[in-house]
Image (tube, grey):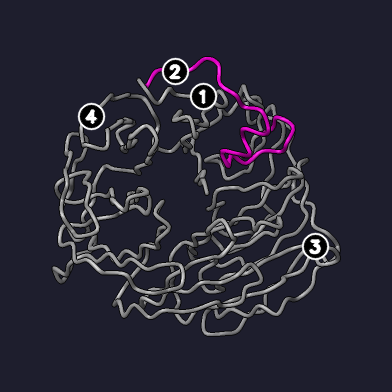
Amino acid sequence: MWKWGVLAGLLAAANLAASPAHAANPSPAQQQTKITVWENGAAKQLMLRGADRYEVKWQFQPDADFYSDVVRDEAGVMYVTTENGVLYALDESGKVKWRTDLQLDWSEHIALGRDGHLYVLADNTSDYDKEPGWIYAADKSGRLLWRMELPSMYSEYDRVFEVDSKGTMYLLTDAGISAVDSEGKLLWSNKDMVEYEYGAYLRSNVRDIRLHESSGTLFVRTTADKLYAIDTNGKTKWTRSSVSYVDEYVVSPEGNLYFLAQTGVSVINGIDGTDMKEAPTDPQTLTRLGIPHDQAGGIFFVTKQGALQKMDRTGKVLWTYWRPKGQTGSISTEPVSDSEGNVYFADSGGSLYGLDKQGKEKFVLIRNNPMYLSTQVWLGRNGMMMAAVEGIGLLAINSK
């Protein structure tokens, strides 16, 4: 699944002012759901706007307050790990298939490798007690395959870990971008692009890494607006500057990099890092890449002003959606779209949104927490909107 993230600074103020805008248009049908959360020591039952047409289909609440992002396989099975190291597998109806207690003191990252195995990470970014980092590998039945202590593993962001089809892991360590095999052997490290800042938390300038296995290339993006291509032997192939770290990108099956920018969709040649003037952006290509779009040339993204917008291929703004007045926080997840061009996202207050391709509300699950809540949104194979929200767990919303 591709994650767009919050795309700050994509459009100029003039373009914002000139675009059609939609205020929130709440449905008159607003009903209580069965979802109860605890805020300020009191129970709060969440409301669903648009309840005449939509409903919460299911909810699953893990046995912990915090949990990892959710990863899914081709069969639609969802995998999530809790802060106390319990790994769950759920089917698309929200039923638990199995649970495995890995007996980790703390875990917050999970990845599905190209080798078909699940990888649970307990990094030591906040290394107060000088504890080592751990990697646990399990199969899709929940059977623990092995665990590895890696004293120098650091993962400030959750997208600095990739696994190829042979089980080689690519991650960030104190030696730089590193390749490690399943026996714990360090194969190589490249520190050319990595800078560290040591303190209460170990920080680095590495934003994410992406693997394109067929060409043997790792793409490494830093917060210094630079993009590096490294081969799978650890050698730097090319470097490109002026690539904003707030813009998300996806690597196509051909090995090219699709970016969203103020001018629309731009594409970088993965072989040499040069701009590609011509590259497919038809609906089929956008769907294949996981870029959120309306099936008719419009692309969805989030602005730093806190609005969801739809633009065309060239960056022309088609409409702007502002959240209802009084909603807390800001849009905090990457929008996702379905086969009809509807778009779904969440905000940092824990509210969930569904809009049609014209920017009109289909539903809003209202949480409105004043604190920042970790959220994630995705679509099931049947088009059902699913989400993981701190304090709620996993849930699904669909039409009645």
Q: Distance between the residues labelled 3 and 4?
A: 49 Å
Q: How far apart are marks 1 and 3 (CA)?
A: 35 Å
Does label 4 or label 1 sit earlier along the sequence? Answer: 4
Front position among marks 4 and 1: 4
Q: How far apart are marks 4 and 1 (CA)?
A: 23 Å
Q: Position of residue 313 (x, y in %)?
A: 63, 25
**Region in magenta:** 273-298
Labelled pair 4, 1 in contact (Cβ < 8 Å):
no
Q: Quadrant of the C terminus?
A: bottom right
Residue 128 belongs to the span the image colors magenta: no
Residue that appears at 60% across and 39% down? 288
Residue at the disc numbered 2: 275
Say above or below: 94 vs 326: below
Say above or below: 284 vs 316: below
Mark 1 belongs to which amino acid? Ser
Residue at disc 1, secondary structure: strand
Does label 4 or label 2 sit earlier along the sequence? Answer: 4
Most common SS among magenta residues: loop
Labelled pair 1, 3 in contact (Cβ < 8 Å):
no
Q: Distance between the residues labelled 3 and 2?
A: 42 Å
Front position among marks 4 and 2: 4
Residue at disc 3, secondary structure: strand
Residue at the disc numbered 4: 236
Does label 1 or label 2 sit earlier along the sequence? Answer: 1
For the image, the number of numbered tags is: 4
Mark 2 belongs to which amino acid? Asp
Circle on res. 266:
1
Mark 3 belongs to which amino acid? Ser
Residue that appears at 51% across and 45% down? 2
Residue at the disc numbered 3: 399
Labelled pair 1, 2 in contact (Cβ < 8 Å):
yes
